[in-house]
Image (cartoon, grey):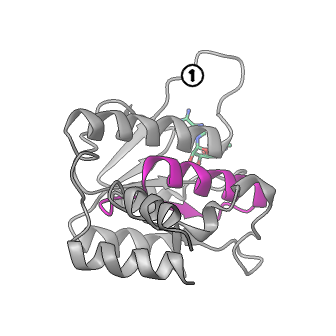
């Protein structure tokens, strides 16, 4: 471990956003799962959440992640509704990406608040019960012939809006992690 590498780790951790996360509800294609984690790393998500597909394990990581899985933790949950309630109990607003009547334009919510973006399975989307339990439903307006985007593209679009708002609010300029936690994670990342 060179001093430069250790400094880079500390710099990255000093921009991590522990109050921004995603919940992947049965996202089952490895390239989508990995691409979402790569975007999480880029915007500073510290820990992502995931409900594994019914088939069992979380989708395996592939080259698409660009090693992001090493830098973004993943917490597994048995079901989406339980995960939504658990996050809300920690004062996190859950924004479900859902194509429904009550969906807001994805740029409307305040992403400087503790926020989780709930993303749905490739085929079925977010379950109705999880969307119902969410604090709001959001949608990226679509004007084409196809009804929806690829889930990793939708995740990136929304997370970079969150990044834009948080940059404007100065949330990348001062560490959001407590000093002791930042140092603990730096050591862990440097010497896994
Ligand atoms: N038939 C599914 C439905 O009606 O929800 C389509 C699922 S879409 C291919 C997979 C996931 O991508 C969605 O659950 C959502 O998380 C995200 N997504 C796709 N297009 C979106 C959009 N326009 N706005 C917000 N999220 C979108």
**Residue 1 appears at what percent x and percent y?**
57, 74
**Quadrant assignment, res 15:** bottom left
**Residue 124 appears at what percent x and percent y?**
67, 53
Task: Look at the picture and state if 108 lies above or below 24.
Answer: above
**Residue 106 appears at what percent x and percent y?**
39, 33
Q: Nearer the viewer, residue 192 or 17?
A: 192
Q: For the magenta stretch, what is the residue range?
A: 18-45
Query: Label 1: few (<14), some or many (≥20) within 10 Å?
Result: few
Specify whether 116 is left or right of 8: left
Which residue is identified by label 1? 142
Task: Look at the picture and state if 57 lies above or below 155.
Answer: below
**Residue 172 colored magenta?**
no
Residue 29 visible in rendering: no
At 64% from the left edge and 45% from the top edge, which residue is drawn? 151
Q: Is mark 1 within 8 Å of ligand 1?
A: yes
Farthest residue, direction front:
3
Task: Look at the picture and state if 75 lies above or below 125.
Answer: below
Q: How many marks?
A: 1
**Quadrant assignment, res 180:** bottom left
At 21% from the left edge and 71% from the top edge, which residue is drawn? 178
Specify whether 88 is left or right of 184: left
Ligand 1, what quadrant? top right
**Residue 38 colored magenta?**
yes
Give SS at disc 1. Answer: loop
Residue 162 visible in rendering: yes
**Residue 32 appears at what percent x and percent y?**
71, 52
């Amino acid at each position: 471990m060179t001093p430069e590498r250790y400094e880079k780790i500390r710099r990255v951790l000093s921009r991590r956003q522990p109050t921004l996360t995603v919940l992947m509800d049965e996202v089952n294609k490895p390239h989508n799962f990995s691409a979402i984690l790569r975007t999480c790393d880029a915007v500073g998500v510290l820990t992502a959440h995931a409900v594994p597909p019914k088939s069992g394990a979380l989708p395996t990581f592939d080259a698409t992640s660009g090693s992001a899985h090493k830098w973004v933790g993943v917490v597994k949950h048995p079901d989406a509704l339980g995960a939504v309630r658990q996050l809300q109990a920690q004062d996190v607003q859950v924004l479900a990406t859902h194509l429904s009547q009550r969906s807001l334009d994805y740029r409307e919510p305040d992403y400087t608040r503790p926020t989780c973006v709930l993303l749905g399975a490739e085929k079925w989307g977010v379950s109705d019960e999880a969307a119902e339990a969410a604090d709001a439903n959001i949608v990226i307006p679509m004007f084409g012939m196809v009804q929806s985007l690829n889930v990793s593209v939708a995740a990136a679009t929304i997370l970079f809006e969150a990044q834009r708002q948080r940059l404007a609010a100065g949330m990348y300029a001062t560490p959001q992690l407590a000093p002791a936690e930042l140092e603990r994670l730096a050591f862990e990342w440097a010497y896994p």
